[in-house]
Amino acid sequence: MNATLIAETGHRVAVYYQTQYDPNLAPNSDFGHYVTPLPLIGLITHLLLAAFHINFADISVHLNDFVPEHPQFLQMWADIALMQANGVKVIGMLGGAAPGTYTCLTPALFDTYYPVLAGYIKRYKLDGMDLDVEQDTPLADIIHLVKRLKKDFGPKFIITFAPVASALIEFGANLSGFDYIQLEKEVGSEISWYNAQFYSGFGSFFPDQMYLDIVNAGNGIHPSRLVATTLTDPDEGFGFIDLDEIVDSITELASQQNFDFGGIAGWEYWDSLPGGENQPYLWASLMHDTMAQIKANQTELLSKVGRSRIWPLDQ
């Protein structure tokens, strides 16, 4: 199925791509063993390029440890452009565990640091930004950033957030310092979806009760806007879920929600099971097939009963 079609109709398959060079395999370039994302073409809808950081000291932006134009990224940018030409949307992940990025986007500092970030978004033609806020940040600062990104890059620019899953329910554990429920009320129409982290003790995708809690709580997030991020390998962190259990949860949740399902994301690409470092794309292949089946089920359902007769989510 064409990646662009899937991306436009939900049922996303996304992969976080942070490790561009595998430290365990023999070098295949001047910078080590380059991990190309090209095998993901046709399997994923979105590549989440991690992680962009804003540096206070020298008013710069780094992609991991280097500026984005560093020679070690030249092949990566060429590959990413080819992926975009084949329908994959490429989204930059901003922030993460390393502190400091969002401190540079306060009202007093915004006009100094934001233009540097915006320059890289334009230069590399990123399709959106995934805001991973893991430091206490005022809600007003985040709303300002969302509105400015939309103003500068237009209505089709993708803005997502990557909160821990528990942050999307009332009084749940939260690393960001602001209320996501209030964020959704204020600028939810500007947010494409949420890549909720279902690991590290902040939520589990199997069993899937927390996902249901998020979509069913009050004016909860519609399932088409909730992507479940899971670990692709036990070495990536605490809370790894076996792949067959992930597929079971996806299938069960989708069947309960008229086959509306936001999608699945994996942290991260380079060592994804079942293929590991030699065939990391096999994780995406399995998830692609799972989403394709759910999409087919939804199409069949709609052909039988019509959209207007689909039952509400709370039944």
Image (tube, grey):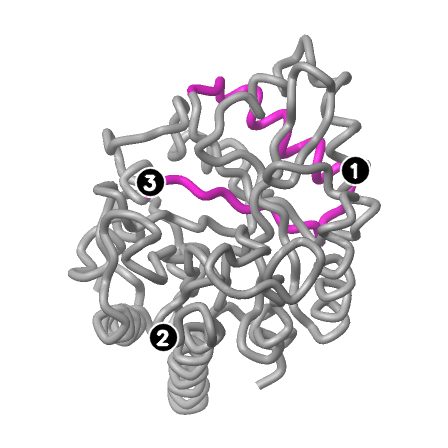
Q: Which mark is residue 259?
A: 2
**Element under disc 2:** loop
Q: Is residue 242 left or right of residue 167?
A: left
Q: Amino acid at mark 2?
A: Phe
How many marks overall? Answer: 3
Where residue 254 appears, as percent x and y from the top left, is 31, 72
Q: Amino acid at mark 1?
A: Asp
The earlier-in-sequence mark between 2 and 3 is 3
Mark 2 or mark 3, which is nearer to you? 3
Q: Which mark is residue 152?
A: 1
Where residue 237 appears, as percent x and y from the top left, is 30, 48
The residue segment tinted magenta is 136-164
Q: Nearer the viewer, residue 289 or 225?
A: 289
Name the residue tied to disc 3.
168
How far, Cα to Cα, is label 2 from label 3?
21 Å
Residue 302: tell me if it is visible.
no
Where residue 294 appears, as percent x and y from the top left, is 38, 80
How far, Cα to Cα, is label 2 from label 1?
34 Å
